[in-house]
Amino acid sequence: MTMTDIQDWIAICEVKARYCRFMDTKQWDAWRDLFTEDYELDVSEAGGPPPIKGRTEALEMAMSFVLPAITVHQVHFPEITIDGDTAEGIWAMQDRVIFGLQGPSLSGFGHYRDRFRRLDGVWKISASKLTRLHVDMVATG
């Protein structure tokens, strides 16, 4: 692994860390900047809608789900493959989504599978797929 590979690996990890932090702290403008215009989101295997293409459409759907909730996203142990200006990564993930009185809360466990593209020297997320291995639902109220 070259020094450039290591720098790219770290930069990609930082993008994913910001993804979690910006979503959880509801920093939507900063969150939006992490994605390519042609971003694709697939949460269908995690109980969500069919895959969505286009950054605006995908992020509007995601924000509609997490906006009313307190969320905590954690990602661990990345497996990243870099090929020039593109990369793929798999992260073990755990999320906690607390809806309060609006509905049951959940604690989920699974994986993010992401694709990245370097644009003008900056790594951005070009596609994401969320799969869940287990979900704990907790009633509220």
Image (cartoon, rainbow, N blue to C red):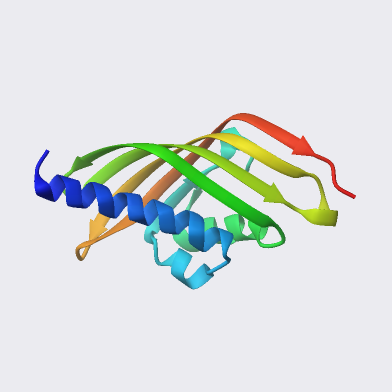
Q: Residue at x 50, y 59 (%)?
A: 21
Viewer-closest of 60 and 111: 111
Question: In the image shown, does 53 or 24 lie closer to the viewer?
Answer: 24
Q: Quadrant of the N terminus?
A: top left
Q: Residue furthest left?
A: 2
Residue 54 seen in the figure:
no
Residue at image point 60% right, 51% down: 72
Total marks placed:
0
State the residue at coordinates (59%, 55%): 62
Residue 112 is left or right of residue 71, and the answer is: left
Q: Where is residue 75 in the image (x, y as percent from the top left)?
A: 46, 43
Left or right, residue 126 beside residue 135:
left
Give the camera-side residue of 39 and 7.
Answer: 7
Name which quarter of the figure residue 49 lies in: top right
**Residue 47: quarter of image:** top right
The image position of residue 108, as x and y in percent, is 62, 37
Residue at the location (48% across, 72% down)?
29
Q: Residue furthest top?
A: 133
* Residue 109 percent location from the top left of the image: 58, 34
Q: Can residue 59 be seen in this view?
A: yes
Quarter where residue 139 is shown = top right
18 on left or right of 106 = left
Quick check: 109 above or below 3?
Answer: above
Q: In this view, does 123 lie above or below 83?
A: below
Q: Up-down: is 12 above or below 56?
A: above
Q: Residue furthest right?
A: 141
